[in-house]
C-alpha cells in the first residue's frame, strides 16, 4: 500500500533536496537517494520542481534572506540577492514552505495553511513570516503601512520614518518605524490575549482603551482586557534571532495546555481534541520540537497524568487518565 502523502513533511524534504543539489559537493550517492525518494511519487516531483523554481527566483531569494534574519534594506533599495539561506534553526521552516508570496501595495489578504508557515515579501521592503492558521491583510499607502492580523506573525520592518508601520489585532495596535517583532493572538481562560515580543528596536503597543507602552528588544508585552503589561524576558533572544516557532521549536513557561495545543496545531498541522475544559487549563512549561508533534503531545500529557489517544492520521485526543 502506498504511503499517505504528508504535504508538510514532503514540502520540507523537497526544499532541502532542492537546496542540497545546488551545492558543488552534490554526489552520485545523493542523486541515487533523491531518485529513490521520488520514485513513484509524482506529487513529490512536483514539489521539488516548485522549490527549484523558488530557489531560482531572485525576489524569493531576497525575501527568504530577510525572513532569515538579514537586516532590512532602505526603502527602494533592496539588497542584491546572493544565495538562498536554508540552514541552522530556520531549515525546518524554510523546508515547509511551498510558496513565498510577494504582495502588491493594497488590500492583499494572505491566509496561512495549517502546519505551513508562509513567508511574505511586502512591496515596501518589509517581510512577514505568517504562522499556520493565521492571516494578514496588508494596506500600504503614501502615509502609512497598516497590517491587520489574525493569529501569529513575525515582522521585519523596513525603515521609513515618513510612513509608520503598524500591526492591528483584536483592537491592539503595535507601531514601529524599523524593528523586528512577533505578534501572537490567543484565547485563554481569562479572555483573548495579544502578546508582543520585540527582538530588535522599539515598538509602541496601544490597547483599545488607549493605554500604551513602549516595548524594547528583549521585552514582552501582553494585552488583556485593554490593559497593557510589560516584562523583560528571562532569556531575551539575541538581536539576530527569530521566534522559537520559526526555528522548529515551541517554548512555554506555565502556559495552558489549550494554548500550547493551539500553537502546535498552527505549526504542525495536527488536530487535537481536549476531552474537557479542565484538561485545557493544565499548565505546561518546556521546549518541544514540532517536527515530532506526537512526542510533544505525549510528553505534555504525561506531565499531568493525562491520556493521549490517536484518533486518526494527525488527529489526537487528550483526556484525564
Image (tube, rainbow, N blue to C red):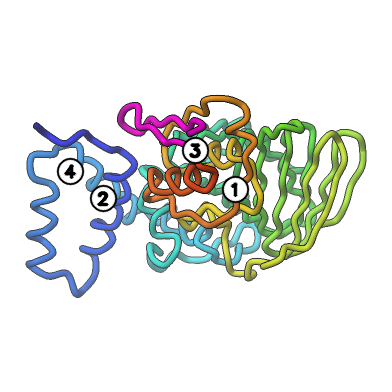
Q: Where is residue 189 in the image (x, y as percent from the top left)?
A: 71, 32
* Place of residue 36 in the rendered image (x, y in percent of width and height, measured from the top left): 8, 51
Q: Does label 1 or label 4 sit earlier along the sequence?
A: 4
Residue to which mark 3 is pinned:
306
Indicate whether 203 appears above or below 171. Answer: below
Query: Which comes sooner in the sequence, label 1 or label 3?
Result: 1
Badge 1 marks a residue whose secondary structure is strand
Q: What element carries label 3?
A: strand
Front label number (1 vs 4): 1
Q: Residue furthest bottom?
A: 25
- For marks 2 and 1, the one nearer the N-term is 2
In the figure, is residue 27 to the left or right of 111? left
Tell me whether circle 1 and circle 4 mark residues in contact (CB < 8 Å): no
Of circles 1 and 3, the one toward us is 3
Seen in the image, is 47 located left or right of residue 182? left
Residue behind mark 2: 14
Q: How far apart are marks 1 and 3 (CA)?
A: 12 Å
Discs 2/1, front = 1
Q: Which of marks 2 and 3 is nearer the N terminus?
A: 2
Q: Give the range drawn in magenta.
A: 307-321
Please rate how many residues cluster around mark 2, counting C-alpha atoms within 10 Å: few if below 14, some from 14 to 19, many from 20.
many
Disc 1: which residue: 284
Query: How far apart are labels 2 and 1 at the CA level?
Result: 33 Å
Amino acid at each position: 500500500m502506498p504511503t499517505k502523502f504528508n504535504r508538510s513533511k514532503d514540502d520540507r524534504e523537497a526544499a532541502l533536496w532542492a537546496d542540497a543539489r545546488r551545492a558543488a559537493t552534490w554526489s552520485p550517492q545523493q542523486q541515487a537517494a533523491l531518485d529513490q525518494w521520488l520514485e513513484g511519487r509524482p506529487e513529490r516531483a512536483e514539489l521539488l520542481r516548485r522549490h527549484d523554481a523558488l530557489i531560482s527566483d531572485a525576489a524569493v531569494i531576497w525575501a527568504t534572506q530577510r525572513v532569515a534574519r538579514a537586516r532590512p534594506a532602505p526603502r527602494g533599495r533592496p539588497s542584491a540577492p546572493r544565495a538562498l539561506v536554508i540552514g541552522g534553526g530556520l531549515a525546518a521552516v524554510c523546508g515547509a514552505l511551498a510558496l513565498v508570496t510577494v504582495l502588491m501595495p493594497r488590500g492583499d489578504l494572505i491566509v496561512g495553511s495549517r502546519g505551513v508557515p508562509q513567508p511574505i515579501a511586502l512591496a515596501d521592503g518589509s517581510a512577514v513570516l505568517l504562522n499556520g492558521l493565521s492571516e494578514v491583510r496588508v494596506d500600504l499607502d503614501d502615509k502609512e503601512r497598516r497590517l491587520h492580523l489574525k493569529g501569529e506573525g513575525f515582522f521585519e520592518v523596513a525603515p521609513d520614518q515618513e510612513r509608520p508601520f503598524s500591526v492591528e489585532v483584536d483592537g491592539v495596535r503595535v507601531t514601529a518605524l524599523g524593528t523586528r517583532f512577533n505578534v501572537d493572538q490567543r484565547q485563554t481562560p481569562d479572555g483573548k490575549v495579544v502578546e508582543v515580543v520585540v527582538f530588535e528596536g522599539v515598538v509602541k503597543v496601544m490597547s483599545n482603551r488607549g493605554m500604551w507602552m513602549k516595548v524594547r528588544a528583549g521585552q514582552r508585552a501582553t494585552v488583556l482586557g485593554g490593559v497593557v503589561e510589560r516584562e523583560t524576558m528571562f532569556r531575551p533572544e539575541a538581536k539576530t534571532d527569530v521566534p522559537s516557532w520559526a526555528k522548529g521549536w515551541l517554548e512555554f513557561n506555565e502556559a495552558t495546555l489549550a494554548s500550547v495545543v493551539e500553537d502546535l496545531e498552527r505549526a504542525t498541522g495536527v488536530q487535537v481534541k481536549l476531552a474537557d475544559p479542565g484538561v485545557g487549563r493544565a499548565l505546561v512549561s518546556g521546549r518541544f520540537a514540532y517536527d515530532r508533534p506526537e512526542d510533544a503531545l505525549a510528553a505534555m500529557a504525561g506531565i499531568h497524568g493525562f491520556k493521549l489517544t490517536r484518533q486518526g492520521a494527525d488527529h489526537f485526543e487528550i483526556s484525564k487518565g
